[in-house]
Image (cartoon, helix red, strand yellow):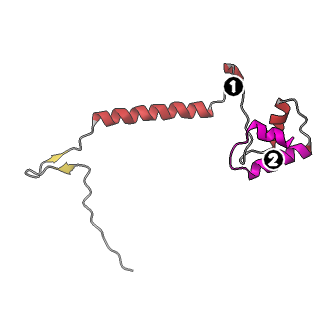
Amino acid sequence: MATATVHADVRPVRESRSAGVVAPLQRIGSLDLVRGAIMVLMAIDHVRVYSGVPAGEFGLEQVIEIGPMSGKSNVVYWLEKRGLEPDETRVNRIYEYAKAAHGVLEESEIRQLL
């Protein structure tokens, strides 16, 4: 069995060009400030997206759209929200149309399928 030793000169600091003086890496304060601000905004956005507070608590209403990524429950909810009977034939027709679509369906498109 052969073994080899690899020696690497890994330095966490950079050397100055004059007389081998070692100086620590300097940080740019303005970049740190920008990075910090971005991290705060990302944290706020993450909380907003994944919060468990119902929309009704803020006087809002849950918006359910129907598109290629939707399930049948989206179709059923959409129909019931508009006072329409979500019978199996109607749900399947809208669902299959949505799966073949290239984006979220407009209300007029869905109503044509009724």
Picture quadrant of residue 87: top right
Q: In x, y percent, where is residue 20?
A: 11, 52
Picture quadrant of residue 81: top right
Q: Is residue 99 magenta?
A: yes
Helix, strand or loop status at disc 1? helix
Q: Residue at x 85, y 47 (%)?
A: 93
Magenta stretch: dominant secondary structure:
helix
Which residue carries the number 2 mark? 95
Q: In x, y percent, where is residue 42?
A: 49, 35
Picture quadrant of residue 34: top left
Residue 77 position (above or below residue 24): above
Q: Residue at x 35, y 32 (%)?
A: 33
Q: Quadrant of the N terminus?
A: bottom left
- Mark 1 vs 2: CB contact within 8 A: no
Residue 60 position (above or below residue 102): above
Which residue carries the number 1 mark? 55
